[in-house]
Every structure is written in structure tokens, then in C-alpha cells.
Amino acid sequence: MNEDPRISRFRQMVEADPENELGHFSLGKAYLEVGRFEDAVTPLSRAVELNPRMSKAYQLLGDALHKTGRREDAIDVLTRGVTVADDQGDRMPRDAMAGMLDEWGAPVPAFKETVPLGPAEAMAGAATPGFQCSRCGRPGGQLGKQPFKGPLGEKILENVCTTCWREWIAMGTKVINELGLVLSTSEGQQTYDQYMIEYLQLEDR
Ligand SMILES: [Zn+2]
């Protein structure tokens, strides 16, 4: 059987580093994309366990559970997921999960009121008023300049806070080592960028 090369790569990553939330998340997402819903459940559950703030992982896990006929489990995961996403200001996954619950006739948890930014927080994000990090959902802490040239660098400046960017640098180093990526090749660079986009939750931005 010819397996999607991404799946083998992500599996390799998970085996090399079982605590790597991004590896589990990416593996589950890849299974989901090729219709292997049952296989997607374990890695996505693990991603949620390792990082209970990863709202997108709840969304995909709920989807996988629902597609394998576990409606109650799916509702349970998405109900938690909506609250996590709402707390962090991850609007896209929150609304997607709320939509799924609604479609299945399950109750949707109420969203909390949007709290206006305090003066200190507004100052911290002074470069762009209303700046909110795509990964952690916190306001402020925007990078002072693009971390590198090009459209992706621009997206990061617009959407990612300094703390999350530093966390990615550490994670990115692991990704390079574990997958043996050679960044001077376009394939290596592409894989690296794909991980970065996933980790920083820039996909829908
Ligand atoms: Zn952040």
C-alpha cells in the first residue's frame, strides 16, 4: 500500500518525540484528510492531552469522533473545545465547533463577553491597535519587525506575539533535528514552513 508520505513523516516525528504535541496534531490531521477517521482519533486525543489550549485539535478530534459514529464523545470534546477557544479568542475554531454542535442538535456553550483591552495591554500592542496573537489569543506583545522576509514573515508580524514566536523557534529546531530537514532544499523549507504555519495557527489567517 502506498501511504501518504506526510503520514510516514509525522509518524516518524511522533515516534522520535512522543511528547511533541505538534507531531500528534499533524499526524491526526493528515489521517483525517485522507479519510482515516479511526486512525485520527488517537493522535488528536494525545495532542489535546499534551496541550489543552490547542483549540484546533479539539475541532479535528470532534470531527474524527463524529465520523466514526461516536456522537456523544464528539459532543463532549467540542463542548470543551468551544470554551477553550472562546477563552483564548480563537474565533475561527470556536465558531466552527459551535456550528458543528448546533448542526448535531447539541447545546452550544455561551460565549463570554469580549473584554475591552486595558490601557497597559493596548500599549503593549501599540504597533497595531487591537493586535491579538493567533496562537495564544493574548493581546499585545507584537514583534517589532518581520522575523524574515516574504509573505509568511509578514503574516507572522501581523498575527504572532513575541512569546509564541520564541516558542516556535525552540519547536522548529526540534522539527529540523527530528525530521532531518535540510533547509537549503525547497522540500525541507516547505516542510518547515508547513509546521510553522500549523504551530502558530496561521492557516486561516
Ligand atoms: Zn502568542
Image (spheres, rainbow, N blue to C red):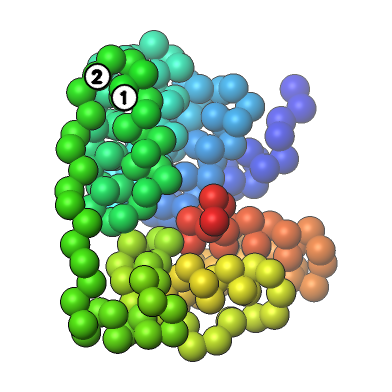
Are the residues at dot 2 and dot 1 in contact (C-beta closer than 8 Å)?
yes
Crowding at label 1, few (<14), some or many (≥20) Cα neighbours within 10 Å? many
Q: Nearer the viewer, residue 74 or 40?
A: 74
For the C terminus, which image quadrant?
Answer: bottom right
For the N terminus, which image quadrant?
Answer: top right
27 displayed left or right of 118: right
Query: Along the polypeptide, which appears first: circle 2 or circle 1?
Result: 1
Residue hosting label 2: 106
Q: Amino acid at mark 1?
A: Leu
Total marks drawn?
2
Q: Amino acid at mark 2?
A: Ala
Residue 52 percent coordinates (x, y): 28, 49
2 displayed left or right of 29: right
Instruction: Name the residue located 24 percent from the left edge and 19 percent from the top edge.
Output: 106
Query: Of the numbered discs in the image, which one, if any, rests on residue 35?
Result: none
Instruction: Note whether residue 126 is visible.
Output: yes
Query: In the image, is residue 158 above or below residue 23?
Result: below
Instruction: Name the residue located 71 percent from the left edge and 30 percent from the top edge.
Output: 3
Crowding at label 2, few (<14), some or many (≥20) Cα neighbours within 10 Å? some
